[in-house]
Image: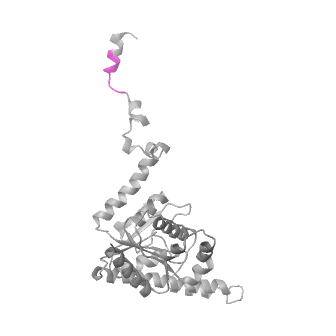
Amino acid sequence: MQPHKRIRYCRRRPIAWHLQTPAYRLAFADDDFLLSEDMRAVRLMLELSKPEAELRANNIEQTVVMFGSARTVDAETVKLKLAELPDTEENKHKRRALTRGAAYYEEARRLAGLIAKESPASACGELHVITGGGPGVMAAANRGASEQGAKSIGLNIVLPHEQYPNPYITPELCFRFHYFAMRKMHFLMRAKALVVFPGGFGTLDELFETLTLVQTQKIKPLPILIFGKEYWARLLNFDAMVEDGMISPEDVQLFQYVETAEQAWQLIQEGIVQLQTAP
């Protein structure tokens, strides 16, 4: 191509298809680019930064994390389920599990209510309840805080079967995550205590991650309360782990079993104050 022709071409106005190409899109407005493998680190940073900004804007400084099964339901729902479930020997365990689950739901609701109502005037300072944002124990905890007129947080996650936020979360504190890693980080960044109710794989995951982080001194110690010893003793044998040398004897001191909302709230207060005044 001759020089004068090249110059004349460059001075022409861009033709329409130049403006339509992916390369011409602004990087932050290019969904294909943002969702690409190359931008995973950026997406992780966004999931860290967005909730952080909103939590700061709402003056959320200290939280109590509450985990538990999404399948637990309230007493009213259990009553309806029991009415549909024949009282036979075959259904005996199902009926007992439903009733027990309703009791856990109520304790979670009452504990969150106590935290919301009493923490502002307590020695440990104002605490906000934070949950996974779904149904079950999570809904019970958000509900207990809401009934006291307090803000509470819900961290939803994208799942194969879509998880929807429960209606008790404070709307401006209802977040949605793609990455479990960022969601877990936000659970613990402001955590002053962890309360774990009976649950499944997700609950176990959160419990053991927190225990591991405290054990390895990646986070500061905090009260870790395991609700319902009867359930957990059937599920986990911590003594066997000590006996076989898989954990140290002092590791079983990282958590405590509790049975009532009042007991849990008392231990939360004592634990937080003790850690605040420790040298």
Quarter placement of the C terminus = bottom left
Looking at this rendering, what residue extends furthest in the top direction? 2
Displayed quadrant of residue 262 = bottom left
Q: In this view, does 101 lie to the left or right of 31?
A: right
Displayed quadrant of residue 131 = bottom left
Q: Residue at x 51, y 72 (%)?
A: 251
Q: Residue at x 27, y 82 (%)?
A: 121
Res. 267 in view: yes
The stretch drawn in magenta includes residue 161: no
Residue closest to the eye, 214 or 208: 214
Quarter placement of the N terminus = top left
| Way the structure is coloured | one colour
x and y, in percent, of residue 102 in the image: 53, 84
User: What is the span of residues highlighted in magenta in the rendered image?
Assistant: 7-14
Residue closest to the eye, 223 or 132: 223
Residue closest to the eye, 182 or 233: 233
x and y, in percent, of residue 194 in the image: 44, 74
Q: Is residue 82 above or below residue 191?
A: below
x and y, in percent, of residue 79 in the image: 56, 87
Total label count? 0
Q: Is residue 69 left or right of residue 89?
A: left
Residue closest to the eye, 185 or 242: 242
Res. 84 in view: no
Q: In this view, does 15 lie to the left or right of 79?
A: left
Displayed quadrant of residue 172 = bottom left
x and y, in percent, of residue 76 in the image: 51, 86
The stretch drawn in magenta includes residue 8: yes
Q: Which residue is drawn at 60% across and 87% down?
A: 82
Q: Residue at x 59, y 80 (%)?
A: 233
